[in-house]
Image (tube, rainbow, N blue to C red):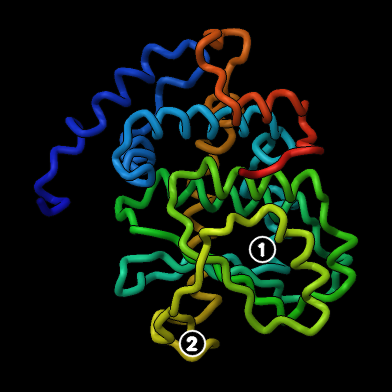
Amino acid sequence: MPDQEIDWRQEIAPLKDWLSKQPHLPHDVEDIILRRFYLSCRKNVDRAKRTIDLFFTIRANAPDLFCNRDPCSPGIRGVFEVTDMLPLPNNTPENYKVFIYRLNNPDMSLFDFVNAVKTFFMLIDTRLSEVEDIPSGEIPIFDAANVTLKFIGKVNLSVLRKYMMYTQEAVPVRLKQVHVINAPSYIGKIFALCKPFLKSEVSKLDVPKDIFPEEYGGNAGTIEQIKRHWIKRMEAKRDWFLKNDERWAVNEKLRPANCNDEKTKKVKELPGSFRSLTLD
């Protein structure tokens, strides 16, 4: 049955009913978000429930990444001055969304790793809550042309672990591949930081060149045009971000005893640090 003929309200009704009965979880979650969880979990309601719980649990245990999120603040605007975060306008023939991330300035003194991850998550929230089109998968591409060995000194391992767990286990998308392009020979040292946290089923996939920005030989417009589009969308959601610091998080004091699976336990047993987190 084509998507346009599916009654999504009926499809996600079990999730909405379940969520309304969870005292520790937020209840005012948009339908589009619940639909994303439902589809990313292959329409498995029980799996979607576990993923939703983990999603809000990680957010509550990572205030450094999910609080004080003002898209108009100097810290967030500073990230966009030295990085390009680009959800590309068109999907692949397989209906996969492609995302490019790159440093546009090699001066590492201007780069703040924590603010960069926070901004990246704000961009994800903008897409999850506003874009009705739900792709069949996601392909992040990291352009390492301006990455130097000084980048290693900027990486916060605690934040990196949170990033890896959140993006691979909790965000309602289906990760198809992680690409690294234009990598210098020493990039292996940087990749070694991430490799222990990358899941083995993330496999290779070809991406059509024409969906890339003009600077990469494609037809999707310029990097600046795509970037400005998303900056404007984030800034237009300023009130939403400022209100969501506490709204999109669990209240552990209200969590029922039977709502503790192994992944949420791992998050809560490591108060704010994720120091010994191991991905399955």
- The residue that disc 2 covers is 214
State the image coordinates of residue 120 (x, y, percent, origin top left).
61, 54
- Does 173 appear above or below 262? below
Q: From the viewer's perspective, is residue 18 above or below residue 119?
A: above
Can you give x and y, in whole percent of width and height, for residue 90 in the image? 36, 72
Label at residue 80? 1
Left or right side of 109 for 181: left
Question: Disc 1 versus disc 2: distance between alpha carbons?
Answer: 19 Å
Check whether the beta carbons of the residues at disc 1 and disc 2 lie within 8 A of each other: no
Residue found 27% across the figure and 24% down from its top: 14
Vertical arrangement, residue 146 with respect to residue 247, above or below: below
Mark in the foreground, 1 or 2: 2
Q: Is residue 99 left or right of residue 135?
A: right
Q: Amino acid at mark 2?
A: Glu
Q: How many marks?
A: 2
Between 264 and 4, which is closer to the camera in this rendering? 264
